[in-house]
Amino acid sequence: MNSTFVLDRGARERKRYPVPIPSDSTYFDLDLQCTVLATTPSERPDLWREFVEGALESYSHFGVEKALEYDRIVDGSSTSLFFAALDDSGRICGGLRAQGPYSLPDQTHADLEWVSSPQGRTSLRSMVAARLPHGVVEMKTVWSSVRGPRRGSPGYLGAIGASLAAAALGCRFTLATSADHAMGPYLDSGAVMAADIEPVPYPDDRYRTRILWWDQHTIASTTTSAKYRQISQAVDALLGRNNISTEAAAS
């Protein structure tokens, strides 16, 4: 049976008026075996520098440093919030960042990625415009350290990060782009692919990159009960509230 529980129950009321989470909010993630810290580049410039340098090393390792746009993001001005996974020594071993909430349909980074596809870009803007009244954030720069042991299952941090970002910034929708080969964990966490928008060769011709959306009001019906429980527990922990008993989503 599908759950009627809204993952972040305050999202409807906050919409375009997000209530910031306390500075340097944290929770301990059992899957990552790390403390996940949510903060901003201005609050933690030291950690932000570690974040972007770690992301550069990771992206360069896989030959996709072009997609990072290091020079564009390094000053932190385009980042509303970032999440850092910290091991027990305080070393950052992965993370992601969020842009938004947006106010116009052409503000997304995905809009730039679809510059080679005018029809797809128009469709993307229509999708964003329809969701703006409910709040839209965009997840970017998901990375894991190429040093040391793997933390969590592949793609785990990005998979839960989409909902963490939406909840922390008071939005219903999270937008992200992903190459075909990397979409699995995102789809497992409730993302829905925009099938009507053709993929683009971003950041280069080796990849077919697609549009993904997470909707906090329907995520229970687009993921498994186990993954939904995992995501809702992470959101509750980040927001500092007790876990909420829910009727499980269908497996």
Image (cartoon, grey):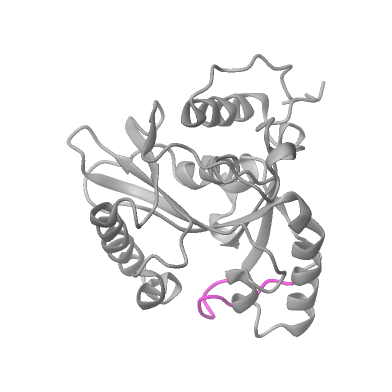
Can you name the residue that lies furthest to the top here?
245
Which quadrant does the C terminus fall into?
Answer: top right
* Residue 235 is covered by the magenta coloring: no
Residue at image coords 72%, 69%? 105
Depth check: give the residue in front, 130 or 194. Answer: 130
**Residue 205 seen in this snapshot:** yes
Q: Quadrant of residue 49?
A: bottom left
* Viewer-proximal residue among 86 and 193: 86
Give the percent coordinates (x, y) of residue 60. Answer: 31, 69
- Magenta stretch, main secondary structure, is loop
Q: Position of residue 137 (x, y in %)?
A: 61, 55
What residue is shown at x 70% (from left), y 69% (from top)? 104
Q: Is residue 139 left or right of residue 210?
A: left
Residue 167: quarter of image: top right
Quarter of the image with the N terminus in it? top right
Eyeballing the image, is 50 above or below 210? above
The residue depicted at 78 percent of the width and 64 percent of the height is: 129
**Residue at 47% over, 41% down:** 156
| Extreme-left residue of the structure | 89
Please give the range of residues in magenta. 198-207
Q: Position of residue 199 (x, y in %)?
A: 68, 71
Depth check, front residue: 167 or 159: 167
Q: Quadrant of residue 180?
A: bottom right
Q: Is residue 208 visible?
A: no
Judge whether 185 appears above or below 195 on screen.
above
Q: Is residue 76 above or below residue 239?
A: below
